[in-house]
Amino acid sequence: MFELNEEQRAFQDVARSFSRDHLSPFAAQWDAEGFFPVETMRKAAELGFGGLYVREDVGGSNLTRLDASLIFEALSSGCTSTAAFMSIHNMSSWMIDRFGSAELRQRFLPQMCPMEKIASYCLTEPGAGSDAAALRTKAEKDGDYYILNGSKAFISGAGVSDIYVTMVRTGEEGAGGVSCLVIEKDTPGLSFGKSEEKLGWKSQPTGAVIFENARVPAENLVGSEGMGFKIAMAGLDGGRINIASCSLGTAQSALDHALNYMDERKQFGRKLQAFQALQFKIADMATELEAARLMVRQAAVKVEAKTADATRWSAMAKRFATDVGFDVVNQALQLHGGYGYLRDYPLERNLRDVRVHQILEGTNEIMRVIIARDLFA
């Protein structure tokens, strides 16, 4: 039996309370208006949610990957999109904490943990999505600076975030030529594309990050030259667990709404919950969701322990939980009938928000590649 300890249950309760009081009542409005709730995220950061697995000497909470999974699952039950952005900010902070120099950690993380400064993660490019090692954004050394040219695509927080943890090419083709830089918003030569019109995730802006002879101090290098792809992949192991956790929380919320609706709604003189066909559907939704939750938590423990199979488990958990999450939300919408299709209910927003989880942090097709490659190794 996978039993949470008292401290983990306390984290979960705090996150659920925050989600109920500060996210859920406003999520529909943020979605409709495309509003980025920075001040609300800063309130979450006051609870330690802005630097979940950053070390304490720079203001982090120094929690485990399992602790973070519980928190993101709880937060996403209130607003999937906002919880997902906080996951991205936390992944960016962790990269600096884990691989950055002492000077870099002290310069950035004390402002990132309370989310006084918001962070984005920049890996994807117009021509390098699933094939991340083919990225083209070039960083050429010029004395104490790198001169950057290129662009990043689909970047959450583009144009609003203060810090961009960015993968660039400093060397040869392939993974070995990739490095990681911390880039500040006011960097000369840095600009942003228009905010994309998206299906979901509307409480966070998404756009292109553009470098045109952008001058970035060489001291902003995270780790050493050539370490970037390793840093990116290590970050994604945790990021995949977080986004899977966001799927779990959204799906649980949708399931709870369906259960309440089936207790209230009557057809043919009976409550919907009295129809065995619908009972079976609910039973399958709950079973799949619990199976996904167990897989995500097991993967979180493995990533924390850095086990040899951690990357495979992270990929399996992400693939399974995001597929299950979307299916559970879709079935919950179906159980609401026409009402589920209306914005009066959260189901249609839940559906739009979780759909992208099967695409980002590595598509679920790429998850299968990772899993199979490890099995055949």
Image: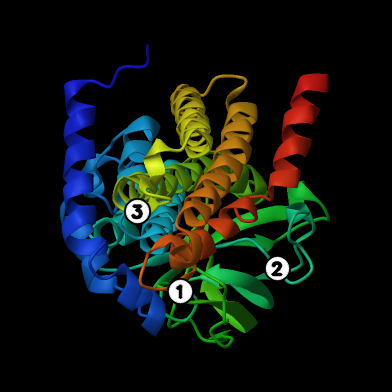
For the question of whether residue 79 can be seen, the reply is yes
What percent of the width, then of the height, locates residue 255?
A: 40, 45
Q: Give me the disc on residue 202.
A: 1
**Nearer the camera: disc 3 or disc 1:** 3
Position above or below: 127 against 291: below
Q: Which three-letter amino acid code belongs to the residue tagged 3?
A: Arg
Q: Residue at x 23, y 20 (%)?
A: 5
Q: Can you say which quadrant of the picture contains the C terminus?
A: top right
- Helix, strand or loop at label 1? It is loop
The numbered mark, 3 or 1, whose residue comes first in the sequence reads 1
The numbered mark, 2 or 1, whose residue comes first in the sequence reads 2
Using the image as rendered, state which of residue 201 and residue 129 is in the foreground.
201
Q: Give me the disc on residue 237.
A: none
Q: Which residue is mark 2?
A: 125
Marks 2 and 1 sit apart, C-alpha to C-alpha, by 21 Å
**Nearer the camera: disc 2 or disc 1:** 1
Marks 2 and 3 sit apart, C-alpha to C-alpha, by 47 Å
Q: Which residue is mark 3?
A: 265
Q: In the picture, residue 70 is in which quadrant?
A: top left
What percent of the width, then of the height, locates residue 58?
A: 24, 49
Marks 3 and 1 sit apart, C-alpha to C-alpha, by 30 Å
